């Protein structure tokens, strides 16, 4: 009896069964997958492009109802006509209109922002009389912090911890892959002028004169280009006030050769603000070993937040940040200050990928064992080889295509592995 002729799939399978290159191809596929698993960037959140911006327009003296009818409603109508806009959320308050514009997912961010700016600037003449210039603030999903560390202490107060946090942040910004970074909590620095009324009266100076002198001394302005010796030179006045001594030395009045300075009229205080607008506190739980040294009492705290650039491996970035923190902890950070890492997306992503590979190996082992008991060694060997090869091809293709290993991609891989996972 003549066997039936093989179709294309059969001939292809027969070729690889009889070919001596099959083993080498399998080894190459496993190596390809290993490279994809090791070198594909890992992060917690997926790279989703959702362009958005917040626009604020001030209308001083207007009530919320006036802001809504005169400013917000016409402004929203103009923004809705922009191509690619998905949602518009407007809020009217006393003297202020705030609009959040969200574009369709996948829209090019630069093109969307250009269209938004063009629309806002083109329709400025339609704003009601008295309205100020619109303030446009871009909102980026990549600004979500991937790494946060909290500085807390029983000895140092909020102002001192914030100053330390800002110094630490300056060193962390030099780490490759760091994007936006900022400090949350603590009390900021404030140079305060506490006017003495009797001094003003004795010198015959008004509070407006004092304020005008300080404002005129605090300038930073470009004077444009000037040509000297056939060369363009950029001129700039850099007179920003950066210390209490600079503020104290400002001349308010020249009284017949006698200079009256700010220090003659007021006390200059360089420190935290007197009015507290926010408060941040930190405490260790009972299970933490450090609770033995500091107890469970709430302490002052300031938190550093660091976001990563697009496509950067979160595992590599947070590892470098941890090393830099360890160096600073041995250097200038006082021993009374505790550094607590409160968020690390790199550790989460690395742990998730490790668990995925571990579950895959467990699933392959269990399925191969069941196949060995009921169907024999040949079927068990096919399963033990095929599943890792398929997974290797997927990981290698992921490395070439560009997507990172994040919660979404790992969920998709888990869904494919789940039918094989017992227990």
Image (cartoon, rainbow, N blue to C red):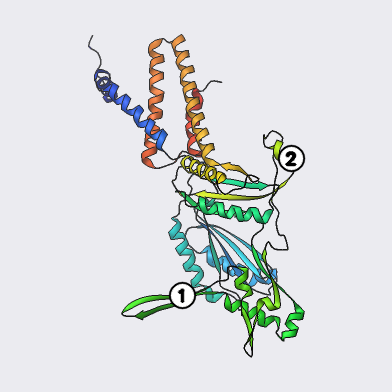
In the rendered view, does 257 fall on the left or right side of 308?
right
| Quadrant where the C terminus is found in the figure | top right
Q: Which residue is drawn at 58% across and 50% down?
A: 304
Residue lying furthest front: 258
Q: Mark 2 points at which residue?
A: 296
In the rendered view, does 137 fall on the left or right side of 155?
left
Q: Residue at x 47, y 13 (%)?
A: 369
Residue lying furthest bottom: 256
Secondary structure at numbered mark 1: strand
Near-viewer residue (20 or 178): 178
For marks 1 and 2, the one nearer the N-term is: 1
Near-viewer residue (222 or 85): 222
The location of residue 21, given as percent across then percent down, is 25, 23
Residue lying furthest left: 2
Q: Residue at x 46, y 64 (%)?
A: 115
In the rendered image, is residue 135 in sight?
A: yes
Secondary structure at numbered mark 2: loop
The location of residue 386, given as percent across then percent down, is 38, 22
Q: Mark 1 points at which residue?
A: 236
| Quadrant where the N terminus is found in the figure | top left
Quadrant of residue 76 in the image?
bottom right
In the rendered image, is residue 142 in sight?
A: no
The location of residue 32, given as percent across then percent down, is 34, 31
In the rendered view, does 77 fall on the left or right side of 114?
right
Q: What is the total number of numbered labels drawn onto the structure image?
A: 2
Q: Which residue is drawn at 66% across and 47% down?
A: 152
Residue 227, relative to residue 158: is it above or below? below
Quadrant of residue 225 in the image?
bottom left
The location of residue 247, given as percent across then percent down, is 62, 73
Circle 2: is it few (<14), some (14-19), or many (20+) Cα within 10 Å?
some
């Amino acid at each position: 009896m003549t066997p039936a002729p093989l179709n294309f799939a059969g001939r292809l399978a027969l070729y690889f069964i009889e070919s001596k290159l099959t083993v080498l191809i399998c080894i190459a596929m496993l190596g390809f997958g290993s490279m994809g698993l090791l070198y594909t960037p890992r992060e917690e959140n997926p790279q989703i492009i959702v362009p958005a911006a917040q626009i604020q327009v001030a209308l001083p003296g207007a009530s919320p109802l006036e802001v809504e009818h005169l400013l917000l409603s016409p402004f929203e109508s103009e923004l809705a006509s922009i191509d690619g806009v998905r949602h518009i959320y407007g809020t009217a308050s006393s003297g202020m209109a705030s609009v959040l514009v969200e574009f369709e997912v996948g829209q090019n961010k630069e093109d969307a922002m250009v269209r938004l700016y063009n629309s806002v600037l083109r329709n400025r003449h339609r704003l009601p009389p008295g309205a100020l210039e619109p303030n446009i603030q871009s909102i980026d999903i990549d600004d979500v912090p991937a790494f946060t560390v909290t500085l807390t202490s029983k000895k140092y107060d909020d102002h001192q911890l914030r100053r330390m946090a800002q110094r630490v942040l300056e060193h962390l910004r030099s780490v490759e892959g760091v994007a936006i970074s900022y400090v949350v909590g603590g009390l900021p620095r404030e140079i305060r002028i506490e006017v003495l009324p009797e001094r003003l009266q004795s010198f015959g100076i008004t509070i407006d004169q004092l304020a005008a002198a300080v404002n005129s001394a605090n300038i930073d302005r470009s004077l444009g280009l000037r040509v000297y010796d056939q060369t363009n030179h950029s001129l700039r006045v850099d007179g920003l006030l950066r210390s209490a001594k600079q503020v104290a030395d400002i001349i308010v009045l020249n009284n017949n050769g006698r200079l009256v300075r700010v220090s003659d009229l007021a006390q200059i205080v360089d420190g935290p603000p007197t009015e507290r607008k926010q408060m941040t506190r930190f405490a260790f739980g009972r299970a933490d070993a450090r609770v033995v040294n500091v107890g469970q009492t709430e302490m002052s705290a300031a938190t550093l937040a660091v976001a990563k650039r697009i496509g950067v491996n979160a595992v590599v970035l947070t590892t470098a940040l941890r090393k830099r923190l360890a160096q600073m902890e041995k250097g200038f950070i006082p021993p009374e200050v505790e550094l607590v890492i409160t968020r690390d997306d790199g550790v989460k992503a690395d742990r998730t990928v490790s668990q995925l590979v571990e579950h895959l190996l467990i699933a392959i082992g269990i399925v191969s064992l069941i196949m060995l008991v009921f169907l024999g060694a040949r079927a068990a060997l096919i399963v033990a080889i095929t599943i890792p090869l398929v997974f290797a091809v997927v990981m290698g293709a992921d490395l070439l295509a560009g997507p990172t290993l994040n919660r979404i991609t790992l969920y998709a891989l888990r869904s494919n592995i789940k039918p094989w996972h017992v227990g």
